[in-house]
Amino acid sequence: MRMGKTLTEKIFSEHTGREVKAGEIVLASVDIAMAQDGTGPLMIKEFQELGFKEVKVPKAFLFIDHASPSPRRELSNSQKLMREFGKQMGVVVFDMGDGISHQVLAERFVRPGDLVVGADSHTCTAGGLGAFGTGMGSTDVAIVFGLGKNWFKVPEAIRVVLEGKLPEGVYAKDVILEIARILGSDGATYKALEFQGSCVEGMDVDDRLTISNMAVEVGAKAGLMPSDEKTREYLKKMGREEDYRELKPDPDAIYEQEIVIDVSKLEPLVALPHYVDNVKRVSEVEKEKIKIDQVFIGTCTNGRLKDLEIALKILRKHGKHPDVRLIVGPASRRVYAEALEKGLIKEFVELGAAIIPPGCGPCVGIHLGVMADGERVLSTQNRNFKGRMGNPEGEIYLGSPAVAAAAAVTGYITDPRRLL
Amino acid sequence: MIRGRAWKLGDDISTDHIAPGRYFHLRNDLEKLAEHLLEDVIEGFAQKINKGDVIVAGKNFGLGSSREHAARIIKIAGISCVIAKSFARIFYRNAINVGLPLVELKETDEINQGDELEVDLERGVVRNLTMGREYRFTPIPKFLLEILKEDGIVNYLKKHGTFPEV
């Protein structure tokens, strides 16, 4: 009897040339591989150590997005090494100002059904387009660069059913924070998340990318969305509709577990220090009047045009609190250009924000907004581990662009629904 | 056979704890980066440990960023093995790839700071010599043990030209 397949099993079957199921260890060919400036230099070193002479993966990229433009001499030197390797091997290097790897890959390269690996844990973002994207270490990516393939354990999948319509003031970020609250930081370790349900069907790819981006925060190897008409719309907008194909799990696929969330009951959420699964309702937390010193709107989680628009909807109505430092980082050159064209950047600048170049910005912890001892940052990023943003004596709170904007307005953690 | 003193850590030790992002510029100098190993968890950790010591942690060790440097500097600092209730996926794979032995053991709460431990990876046994106790764990899958035996995937591929048999 032929058993139904999860999206994960379908993609691995296509990349191994035979029918595979969860639990198997397979040698799979990879479509897209990449490393960034934090992991790229070690990837290059191991690529050379392994004696590879050419890059065999169909699409290979290097991204200088983490410490970019370079704040230090040591980093300038390792970035130079990446550019030289790129030239020598014919690998395209996306340099400063081009944007965050995951966003650029989504805009330009990822196709539904692709197997995407990156030396960056948030490579799972590609799941927003129905691809299997997963983070690996530098050595594993070096092997993929050199062989075009690597070994994988086909993961079991958790079906995450999102039903209903998001209430006003509640966004994709709140959905994934709710999933983190339910599953915890290791609830999906070694597994894939596969998202389904009426909320997913109605959701555009920008929002899907936000949710898939944080699959790794519950330990997942990947977080896959179905590829449907919304995917087609996105690819068309990006000028590559020909990359579209419908791809969904079989109705009789076997899942390891199922979680059902009625999103119409959700409220704005916030992750408190120092863990992503330390999630509370903003309506509860705001009673504590937690003062915020800096707000960061950006990153591969929430640095897209839509996110900037959500934040501005609140900020333009109420203005920025004079004591809050507001940093805005568009996720890519494309997002930046669109935001400029729509006048959003001008509005942010006039509201008192500092605009940083497309890239990871202060989320990396070395530049563009390292907080002082005892300070608190509310960020739209995906991680709030102690020291993540460069200072272990500070605190990081995670929320949607609306929660971030609301804090920038009042100076403390505030329910954005009152400010809409 | 691995033998060393236990260093107790808690749950959810992330790669940001192991290799803090503020030392991003030291990633091409792993010896220097290793001096800052876990310093946000235990001040001066790299200076306090002895060669061969064992990290004993709670659940989900190594979560977060894919930085392989984290697994590498644990090894460079002199830690011989990490025992935890569970490991995050990317870290687990990185550790095997760089030849850092890992043990998944449910009973890590029964091990105390400073206990003398002995680990037999192939037989799947942890002995607490201080407490006189012995624990069994599911041995690392053969596929991965082969990689560990060659001190990591790079050495393995250089020697054998292909991945181990599944």
Image (cartoon, coloured by chain):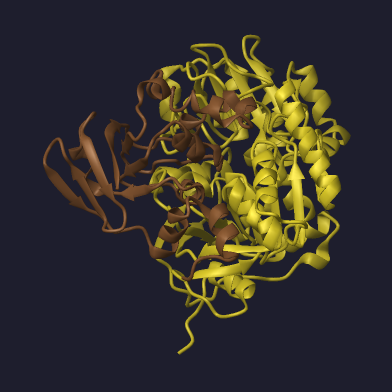
Chain colours: A yellow, B brown
Q: Whole-percent x and y of residue A350? A: 80, 18
**Left or right, residue B126 beside residue A137:** left
Extreme bottom residue here?
A1
- Total residue callouts: 0
The one of A336 and A260 positioned closer to us in this rendering: A336
Which residue appears at 75% of the width and 54% of the height?
A60
Residue B70 x, y percent position in the rendering: 50, 37
Point out residue B83 in the picture as x, y percentages from the top left corner. Answer: 32, 43
User: Which residue is at the far right?
Assistant: A341
- Nearer the observer, A153 or A131: A153
Q: Residue at x 54, y 28 (%)?
A: B31
Viewer-side residue, B94 vs B76: B76
Q: Is residue A111 above or below residue B45?
A: below
Q: Is residue A342 visible?
A: yes
User: Is residue A124 among the parts visible in the rendering?
Assistant: no
- The residue sitting at the front extreme is B159
Q: Which residue of the protein is positioned furthest toward the left in this rendering?
A: B132
Q: Nearer the viewer, residue A195 or A92?
A: A92
Residue drawn at (69%, 64%) of the image? A112
Query: Residue A80, located in which quarter of the rendered image?
Result: top right
Residue A352, picture quadrant: top right
Up/down of A251 relative to B101, above or below: below
Whole-percent x and y of residue B41? 39, 24
